[in-house]
Image: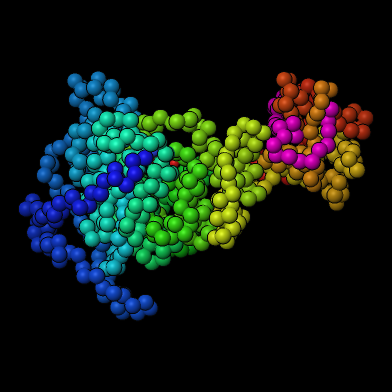
């Protein structure tokens, strides 16, 4: 990380030509000068609505590039660019420099115009005169130079200068010559700590983080700052549109998209449920509450960012930090919104163009495990239960020390993950167990029971406590705190206190197909051969046997299933 000296402050270098009028555009003839455009800073008294109204102005149309110098340039107006036949080879050869069309990126002007994709009302909407200033922070590692420049230009050309305190570029130990500075760097930090290094030197009242391969659209900044101004605990994200990795065209996205996650903490987009739109009579320009943010593009009050304890600095390189900051914001009193009047294009790349110091998958799963351990409470079992069991097995990975993160959550008096699910993301399916109730054995035609340390079969009776079991996300076959497992060279069925770190307590409850009927087995994978839990034919107990789809004594049913 190159430290303060190597972060470039670009705003000082911003030229004054931002607002020259363009003779080709009649509507711009009477364009005001920069001074006229920037309203005087008005001190606004709280709770005085009349003053407030007069202290507002229409979102500024800062963009001189809408009528660019070189109308015929490659990729101009965000249109698809074409690679000439004789350049195809070169284009392919350079693809891996960025995992997108690097060749085209270099042909496209750094200040190209892109279509103004905002919903209609946006250009008419009012924002306050005295919005806070922002520092824009780009961190990057081995970013394609032309793309980084275009990102920076889009900020300079489309942000009201008085709101843009500075642009901070953090070079996270790039290996490319063109990006390395005079001073040799210490080591790769990863985007999380690189952003924190940028934040540490930022002087703006708001921090705006952006990826280094983006193009900010017309009027992108004020709507974000307006939300933070309204409430400093609001964290505002632009709509993220798509810059095609193939032809570099600017592609607009559907309305009412919000950021969500699925298990095991996988980020995704989904359309706001129709009933939410109807109930709140939402227009396409209204802010959208977001359970989680994509991660790369957002504005947050600087002091609030520090009050929240920033990111967990123990997160490495890439991944999971968007979950961490999202849960932290919501559970500790803040809000995340997507602001449809603010739009930024982003190049979605098929692969990371930089190296991971350690294995990518291991890095991401370690980050996610840290997030799960600190923020998910009892729901962390759903995270581990969706393919991450191995993270719990002893000595597999070291997720590092979490004391500070857990203390922070206590200090901030953050709400529970259950609260988050109920209030922020009620559409999320998050049953605490997979199956529950009586465990019926088809062969024995009786139910499993556990009492005084012994497993036996009894006539099924939902009122009998000793017949109630859970099949949990840990794959435990569990009665209260007792788990069924297998032990020893003779593969005996045992009863032990449940322990997430013990693989021999896990049972898959899987459907094996037998002449079109489904047979639910309880399978242990601890042995070289797949073994199933089988009821003794005389019905007195259970033992292990080689799985056989045709054996009804291996077929089990729970009263309730919460998942498929
Ligand atoms: O070690 C690193 N050091 C860095 O400085 C790794 C990356 N980086 C920089 C990198 O150069 C880039 O500018 O960090 C930025 C983000 O890295 P990307 O572009 O490789 O990430 P991404 O766009 O594939 O992934 C998304 O998820 C990441 C999870 O950690 C980050 O939160 C990214 O910011 C985020 N990007 C977005 O939210 C844009 C929309 C993508 C979606 C959905
Ligand atoms: Mn990105």
Residue 433 pos. (x, y %): 69, 45
Q: Which residues are magenta?
A: 492-518
Report the image quarter containing ligand 1: top left
Is 81 in front, or is 180? 180
Q: Is residue 215 in sight in this rendering?
A: no
Q: Is residue 23 magenta?
A: no
Is 440 placed left or right of 152 in the picture? right
Q: Quadrant of residue 493?
A: top right
Is 263 in front, or is 409? 409
Is 500 placed left or right of 340 in the picture? right
Residue 388 pos. (x, y %): 60, 35
Farthest residue in the left direction? 23
Q: Is residue 125 in sight in this rendering?
A: yes
Image point (75%, 34%), residue name: 505
Q: Give the answer, above or below, for where 63 lies relative to 193.
A: below
Q: Is residue 510 magenta?
A: yes
Image point (90%, 28%), residue name: 537
Image quarter of the C terminus? top right
């Amino acid at each position: 990380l190159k430290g303060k000296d190597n972060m470039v402050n670009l705003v000082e270098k911003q030229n004054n030509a931002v607002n020259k009028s363009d003779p080709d555009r009649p509507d711009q003839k009477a364009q005001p000068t920069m001074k006229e455009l920037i309203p005087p800073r008005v001190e606004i008294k709280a709770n005085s609505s009349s003053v407030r109204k007069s202290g507002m102005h229409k979102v500024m149309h800062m963009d001189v590039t809408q009528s660019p110098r070189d109308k015929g340039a490659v990729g101009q107006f965000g249109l698809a660019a074409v690679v000439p036949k004789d350049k195809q080879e070169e284009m392919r050869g350079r693809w891996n420099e960025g995992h997108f069309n690097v060749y085209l990126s270099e042909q496209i002007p750094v200040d190209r115009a892109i279509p103004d994709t905002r919903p209609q009302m946006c250009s008419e909407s009012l924002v306050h005169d005295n919005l806070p200033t922002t520092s824009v922070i780009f961190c990057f590692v081995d970013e394609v130079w032309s793309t980084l420049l275009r990102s920076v230009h889009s900020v300079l050309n489309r942000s009201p200068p008085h709101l843009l305190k500075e642009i901070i570029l953090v070079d996270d130990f790039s290996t490319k010559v063109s990006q390395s500075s005079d001073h040799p760097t210490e080591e790769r930090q990863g985007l999380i700590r690189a952003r924190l290094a940028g934040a540490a030197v930022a002087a703006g009242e708001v921090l705006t983080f952006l990826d280094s391969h983006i193009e900010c659209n017309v009027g992108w900044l004020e709507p974000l700052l307006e939300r933070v101004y309204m409430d400093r605990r609001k964290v505002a994200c632009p709509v993220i549109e798509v810059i095609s990795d193939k032809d570099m065209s600017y592609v607009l996205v559907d309305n009412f998209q919000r950021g969500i996650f699925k298990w095991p903490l996988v980020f995704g987009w989904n359309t706001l449920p129709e009933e939410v739109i109807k109930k709140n009579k939402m227009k396409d320009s209204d802010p959208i509450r977001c359970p989680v943010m994509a991660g790369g593009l957002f504005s947050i009050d600087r002091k609030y960012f520090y009050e929240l304890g920033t990111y967990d600095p123990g997160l490495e390189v890439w991944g999971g930090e968007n979950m961490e900051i999202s849960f932290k914001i919501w559970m500790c009193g803040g809000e995340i919104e997507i602001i449809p009047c603010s739009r930024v294009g982003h190049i979605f790349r098929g692969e990371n163009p930089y190296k991971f110091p350690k294995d990518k998958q291991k890095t991401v799963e370690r980050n996610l495990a840290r997030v799960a351990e600190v923020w998910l409470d009892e729901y962390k079992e759903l995270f581990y239960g969706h393919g991450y069991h191995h993270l719990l097995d002893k000595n597999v990975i070291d997720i590092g020390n979490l004391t500070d993160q857990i203390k922070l959550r206590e200090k901030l008096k953050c709400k529970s993950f259950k609260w988050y699910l109920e209030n922020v993301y009620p559409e999320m399916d998050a049953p605490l167990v997979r199956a529950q109730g009586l465990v019926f054995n088809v062969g024995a035609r009786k139910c499993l029971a556990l009492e005084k340390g012994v497993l036996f079969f009894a006539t099924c009776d939902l009122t009998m406590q000793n017949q109630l079991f859970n099949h949990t996300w840990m794959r435990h076959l569990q009665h209260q705190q007792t788990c069924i497992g297998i032990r020893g060279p003779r593969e005996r069925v045992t009863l032990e206190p449940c322990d997430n770190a013990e693989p021999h307590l896990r049972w898959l409850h899987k459907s094996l197909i037998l002449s079109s009927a489904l047979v639910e087995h309880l399978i242990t994978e601890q042995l070289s051969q797949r073994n199933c839990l089988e009821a003794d034919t005389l019905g007195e107990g259970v033992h292990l046997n080689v799985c056989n789809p045709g054996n009804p004594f291996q077929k089990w049913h729970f009263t309730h299933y919460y998942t498929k």
